[in-house]
Amino acid sequence: MLTNEDRKRIAEAVSAAEAASAGEIVTIVTLQSDSYRDVALAWSIAIAFLALAALEFAPGFYLGLIERLLGLWAHEWTPRAVLGIALTVAVLKFLGMLLLMAWRPLRLLLTPAPIKAARVHARALTCFRIGAEGRTTGRTGILIYLSLAEHRAEIIADEAIASKVTPEVWGDAMHALLVPIRAGQIGEGMVAAIAKVGAVLAEHLPRAADDDNELPDRVIEV
């Protein structure tokens, strides 16, 4: 995901931003925030039900089609045979869609945007609670979280920062992060976002003489 040069530049950007503020910046880059296997399962079930609905809507057409494919002539369909055909079609549609959804790009494409946003936010919160929340003396940790597959990012601040800075303030940092990333420049986007976040932290939480670096500056890749 990142080159060694990207990692070096991100760590240097964090160090520079923290030099002017009491904030502690944690950066995390992940390929994907969730597997979305439940979404793949839901699509597969929906396709199977759609196949059954099509059989219900036009049974004559589909049974006639099956007769032609199998070379049957004036076949008399029993209820058991019809149910067997319906079950076979539903299972084949389910397995076929499940196989298609194993391809990650398609699975991401068919995952609704609100679900992706919620999963990215949930994963970012988990990472924040593990890596930044309450881990600094003055609760001055802040997380910049980037999820590449979903093209989404989150900035989450600990109590001391959140009490002084509203979430809307991070809009410039988010913009600075995402624009280069859309062009494939992940390191460039992270460095730009760190600079924006650092400027806000320096304004609201200036660095004291006795401040220590309590969290690592290196980017975390998960």
Image: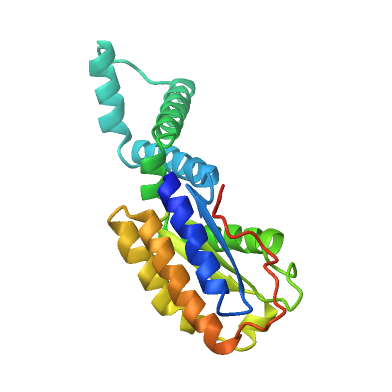
Q: Nearer the viewer, residue 99 or 165?
A: 165
Specify the color scheme: rainbow
Residue located at (61% from left, 89% from top): 164
The answer to whether one can see residue 174 in this image is yes
Residue located at (37% from left, 42% from top): 105
Q: Is residue 173 left or right of residue 159?
A: left
Image coordinates for residue 167, horizontal then vertical, percent: 52, 81
Residue 53 occupies quadrant: top left
Q: Is residue 34 left or right of residue 68?
A: right
Classify 149 as above or below 214: above
Q: Quadrant of the N terminus?
A: top left
Image coordinates for residue 123, horizontal then vertical, percent: 59, 57
Q: Nearer the viewer, residue 181 or 13?
A: 13
Q: How many marks?
A: 0
Image coordinates for residue 48, horizontal then vertical, percent: 44, 37
Residue located at (41% from left, 45% from top): 3
Residue located at (70% from left, 68% from top): 133
Q: Nearer the viewer, residue 198 or 171?
A: 198
Residue 102 occupies quadrant: top left
Image coordinates for residue 140, horizontal then vertical, percent: 67, 76
Residue 132 occupies quadrant: bottom right
Q: Is residue 123 left or right of residue 117?
A: right
Classify 66 as above or below 148: above
Q: Nearer the viewer, residue 166 or 213?
A: 213
The answer to whether one can see residue 114 in this image is no
